Image (cartoon, grey):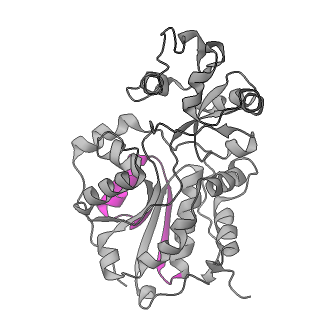
């Protein structure tokens, strides 16, 4: 049985800077479970020698990460690896520490989270540039980022059904065309106050806070993250702050505005693995090459809703989707 060599840990200073910015993508419920159904190969085929190798798959402890983590566990088991399910890690910093230390060999991570939260940089709106920057930086940490998925779980603003029908806009730049009294926002306290939050966003879009042609402070309602979705759907405000792959978007029939002036950083998800594993088993990248391109915003909204709204287990949702795509199969008997 092959064991991974622990990778070096990043500096304490960098991780201290990380703790303040956590929260993006922490949007779902937390149905913690170690359950994973049995799986057999299909499009994902066994890799020669994998049966002699033990790998650990981690994930953070919110819905989307649990689903993605179970997908990875199932995929690597179908490929023949001896997989330890280490999903449901409490917190981004702990998940990152585990990956750096070699306690986990593979996780899904958001490019913007790594670049902004872990590495202490300003976010990059261009998706490919953001991925490349993270990829290049993490090579020195013994970590290899595989190409990113289309899904981009970033900040956004959405309208409820009535507002979407009445206002008739689809992009955030069009908010400027609305009467001032229609420019109403529901946001969480962190986004209201952070340096890259609401106020610079409004300025970026030419509707500065408390300016004659902008948005009066009285038009801003601050509330808990979980309350914003329902408040937006019910018309408490015309525009509610959301995470763009949250299952409540589908459940509450919310319409997400396009960030057409590219204010928000990119948070595409990508598989990142220990470089030692990739070098030892180059074909492990083929496993994720079959999965990653299929991960879209629309798919994750649907899968997240099956867990958060319908109460299904993340592992069952992951298995059902992978079987439907022909990636894996149910074992005979």
Above-or-below relation of 289 to 157: below
Q: Quarter of the image containing the C terminus? A: bottom right
Residue 105 in magenta stretch? yes
Q: Position of residue 218 (x, y in %)?
A: 58, 9
Residue 176 in magenta stretch? no
Along the line of sight, the residue nearer the viewer: 311 or 170: 170
Instruction: Say which residue appears at 45% left-offset and 21% top-offset.
Output: 199
Instruction: Say which residue appears at 40% left-offset and 52% top-offset.
Output: 111
Q: Position of residue 170 (x, y in %)?
A: 64, 37
Highlighted range, magenta: 79-107
Side of 253 where 22 appears, left or right: left
Q: Quarter of the image containing the N terminus? A: bottom left
Along the line of sight, the residue nearer the viewer: 64 or 166: 166
Identify the residue at the far front of this view.
Answer: 177
Q: Position of residue 59 (x, y in %)?
A: 48, 57
Above-or-below relation of 87 to 2: above
Q: Position of residue 145 (x, y in %)?
A: 36, 63
Mark yes or no: residue 224 visible. Answer: no
Mark yes or no: residue 159 visible. Answer: yes
Along the line of sight, the residue nearer the viewer: 47 or 258: 258
Instruction: Say which residue appears at 48% left-offset and 71% top-offset.
Output: 84
Name the quadrant containing residue 28.
top right
Side of 288 where 21 appears, left or right: left
């Amino acid at each position: 049985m092959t064991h991974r060599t622990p990778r070096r840990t990043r500096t304490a200073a960098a991780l201290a800077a990380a703790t303040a910015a956590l929260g993006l993508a922490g949007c779902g419920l937390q149905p913690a479970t170690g359950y994973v159904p049995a799986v057999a190969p299909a499009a994902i085929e066994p890799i020669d020698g994998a049966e002699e190798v033990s790998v650990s798959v981690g994930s953070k402890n919110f819905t989307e990460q649990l689903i993605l983590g179970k997908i990875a566990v199932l995929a690597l088991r179908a490929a023949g690896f001896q997989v330890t399910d280490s999903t449901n890690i409490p917190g981004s910093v702990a998940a990152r520490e585990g990956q750096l230390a070699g306690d986990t060999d593979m996780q899904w991570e958001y490019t913007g989270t790594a670049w902004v939260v872990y590495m202490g940089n300003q976010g990059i709106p261009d998706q490919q540039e953001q991925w490349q920057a993270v990829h290049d930086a993490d090579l020195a940490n013994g970590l290899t980022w595989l190409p990113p998925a289309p899904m981009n779980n970033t900040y956004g603003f959405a309208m409820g059904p009535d507002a979407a029908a009445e206002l008739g806009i689809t992009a955030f730049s069009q908010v400027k065309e609305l009467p001032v009294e229609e420019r109403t926002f529901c946001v969480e306290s962190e986004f209201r106050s952070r340096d890259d939050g609401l106020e610079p966003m409004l300025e970026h879009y030419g509707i500065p806070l408390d300016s004659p042609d902008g948005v009066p402070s009285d038009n801003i309602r601050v509330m808990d993250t979980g309350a914003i979705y329902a408040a937006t759907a019910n018309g408490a405000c015309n525009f509610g702050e959301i995470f763009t792959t949250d299952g409540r978007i589908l459940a509450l029939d919310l319409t997400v505005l396009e960030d057409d002036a590219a204010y928000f950083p990119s948070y595409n998800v990508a598989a990142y693995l220990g470089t030692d594993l990739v070098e030892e088993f180059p074909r492990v990248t083929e496993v994720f090459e079959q999965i990653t391109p299929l991960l879209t915003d629309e798919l994750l909204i649907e899968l997240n809703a099956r867990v958060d709204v319908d109460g299904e287990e993340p592992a069952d949702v992951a298995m059902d989707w992978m079987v439907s795509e022909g990636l894996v199969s149910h074992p005979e008997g």
